[in-house]
Image: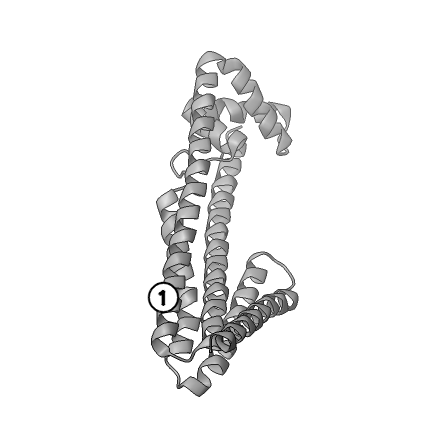
Amino acid sequence: MTEPVGPPDHDEAHGGALGSRLNWLRAAVLGANDGVVSTAGLVVGVAGATDDRTALLTAGLAGLLAGSLSMAAGEYVSVSTQRDSEKAAISLEKRELREQPEAELEELTGLLEQRGLSREVAREAAEQLTARDALRAHARVELGIDPDDLTNPWHAAWASFLAFTAGALLPLLAMVLPPAAWRVPVTVVSVLAALALTGWSSARLGDAAVRRAIWRNMGGGAVAMAVTYAAGSLLGAVAG
């Protein structure tokens, strides 16, 4: 009767760990993608108005810092809210276990039944999991939360900051390093190649159509650069 107890806990831990890693990877890919597109649009737009390297570098660095800090702050607030919700749910579960243990045992039994166990096996498993660590069992089976591995807002903030910064550095360097005549072409090619890579990565992580994701990503970046370059050229012509 003890054999069915181990597998649900083992599978859930591995599934949860895998899901957490995939979420971090998706966040990193999306953060890098945002850094590429937003900074490329900014520096290409400025390049449409001026070929001054200092102006391009200043605009690019300002956009990089503003974007990375904004993403980090937003991720910190978002994940802090999620963490607060997880802690509140665990606190509520702890109180329910203290006040109505039999009802909670029956609830855990029902949840295990829904996972395919027979009534007898589910009851035995619920009793053993409760005896081992009732709060952990309910947190993981009922809430899908690991009490020892709550979401960390600082990790999320740093991950977003670094991913955006890494993505933003590509168009910034591509714009300021080459000679003036090559800046825009080199930046466009570099950005489209990077967007193809992030599109491929996001599609593979999400089990989506790779070709469609790549073209969609590249198309969005190309439109953004075309619009900002046209706007910069127009403003440069008016100012000149």
* Vertical side of 15 occupied by 6: above or below: above
Query: Which colour scheme appears in the figure?
Result: one colour
Residue 50 as seen in the image, left or right of residue 206:
left
Write the residue at 38% across / 77% down: 176
Given residues 197 and 3, the one toward you in this image is 197
Residue 209 as seen in the image, left or right of residue 149:
right
Where disc 1 sits, the SS reads: helix
User: Where residue 42 sits: x, y (%)?
Assistant: 46, 67
* Residue 206, visible in the rendered structure: yes
User: Where residue 96 sits: x, y (%)?
Assistant: 48, 17
Given residues 232 and 184, the one toward you in this image is 232
Q: Amino acid at mark 1?
A: Leu
User: Where residue 215 sits: x, y (%)?
Assistant: 63, 69
User: Where residue 117 sits: x, y (%)?
Assistant: 62, 31
Write the residue at 63% across / 59% down: 208
Write the residue at 53% across / 28% down: 1
Residue at label 1? 61
Residue extending furthest top? 99
* Residue 121, visible in the rendered structure: no
Q: Based on the displayed image, in which of its 4 quarters is residue 120 positioned?
A: top right
How many numbered marks does the figure carry?
1
Write the residue at 50% across / 22% down: 127
Given residues 92 and 48, the one toward you in this image is 48
* Vertical side of 6 occupied by 211: above or below: below
Within-10-Å neighbours for mark 1: few <14, some 14–19, many 20+: some
